[in-house]
Amino acid sequence: MTDVNFETLLDEKLIGDSPKMQQLRMLVKFAGRCNSSIMITGPSGSGKEVVAEAIHTISERGTAPNITVNCGALPEQLIESELFGHEKGSFTGAVNQHVGLFEQANRGTIFLDEIGDMPINMQVKLLRVLETRVVNRVGGSQNLPINVRVIAATHKNLGEAIQNKSFREDLFYRLCVVPIEVPALHEHLEDIPQLVAHFLKNQDNRNPLPIFTAEALGAMQSYSWPGNVRELRNVVERAAVFFSGKQVLAGDIAMLVQSDITRSIHNVATKSQDNQTSPAFNVLPTPSFESQETNVIDLNAHLQNEERRIIMNALDKSHGVVSRAARSINIKRTTLIDKMRKHDIDWHISNNDNMSMAV
């Protein structure tokens, strides 16, 4: 693959022109040209798998298999069989011979995602495979040579894991020949407009796309994005549903972020309040929530007020029936009652779940 093709492919996979992303593309280019083991670190949702895929694609192994393994998702009793294979009858349920993932990735790449979650006993066996370049299927006696490039990734601090004896130091050094750190999104916020455009391009083109205003993009660039690029992609996809063919304004961003089903509105507000170094949304002034700093709204207050408004609207539409209101905003009835207490919404529940509210 030529340098021109390298650059084009990396620009398509690793979006952004910030210094952090330029440095990442440079490291990926070097990694693609070598055959050494690679350790990719970075927070969850930052794009470690995308980086691994880019390395494989631009390497000499690009046309060979690229096998991804989530080490944390494999049951401990099956992980050896999945990675290295097993012979028929080697254990209860082994009714057929199974070719392991390392064999399937022969001449290509195997990506061991969340390597920090691999059980310590399997780390010993993995180290042996990396050093000998042969695998033995469970229940078998034959040494099977493999030619596999190993890329590992983790969001964990492996230095701490080594200290507390949950990760082997010798395996770490065997895997971390070429270290690559993927930055958190809050470290390259200037790339958000390009990332938004990229995610919009991948949306269903049967419906009109939303239009993110400059103010909305500015608000997005002022948020800390604890869920990283994955969270940003979710917000863009959500905007494509709720704002199809419409403008997305600065005031809409908080709603799109707080709707993230991966965590509750309360947790978003708590994290934002605790992280004193991360600014809230820098948007045009909103009198109800404006802080003393010019053009900044208090995200915590905004989310709390928005949550209260959503609850009141749901209760109004359900004519005070708590269970129906809870279903309409996709939370449990008990959770809704707790939130009503939190927002000082007084109610009286009758036997048929009707209520009267005093606000």
Image (tube, rainbow, N blue to C red):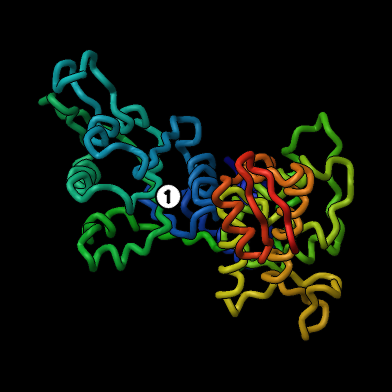
Q: Position of residue 140 (x, y in %)?
A: 13, 24
Q: Position of residue 320 (x, y in %)?
A: 72, 46
* Picture layout, residue 323 above or below residue 231: above
Q: Quadrant of residue 135?
A: top left
Q: Amino acid at mark 1?
A: Cys
Classify the position of the C terminus by image quarter.
Answer: bottom right
Q: Quadrant of residue 126?
A: top left
Q: Nearer the viewer, residue 157 or 15?
A: 157
Classify the position of the N terminus by image quarter.
Answer: top right
Which residue does the numbered mark 1 point to in the structure image? 34
Q: Spot the residue most to the left.
A: 141
The answer to whether 258 appears left or right of 87 in the picture is: right
* Picture layout, residue 302 above or below residue 70: below
Q: Spot the residue most to the bottom.
A: 292
Please say whether residue 198 is visible from this viewpoint.
Answer: no
Q: Position of residue 178 (x, y in %)?
A: 39, 58
Q: Around disc 1, counting alpha carbons within 10 Å, would you say few (fewer than 14), some (14 to 19), or many (20 or more)?
A: some
Residue at x 44% of width, y 30% of height: 65
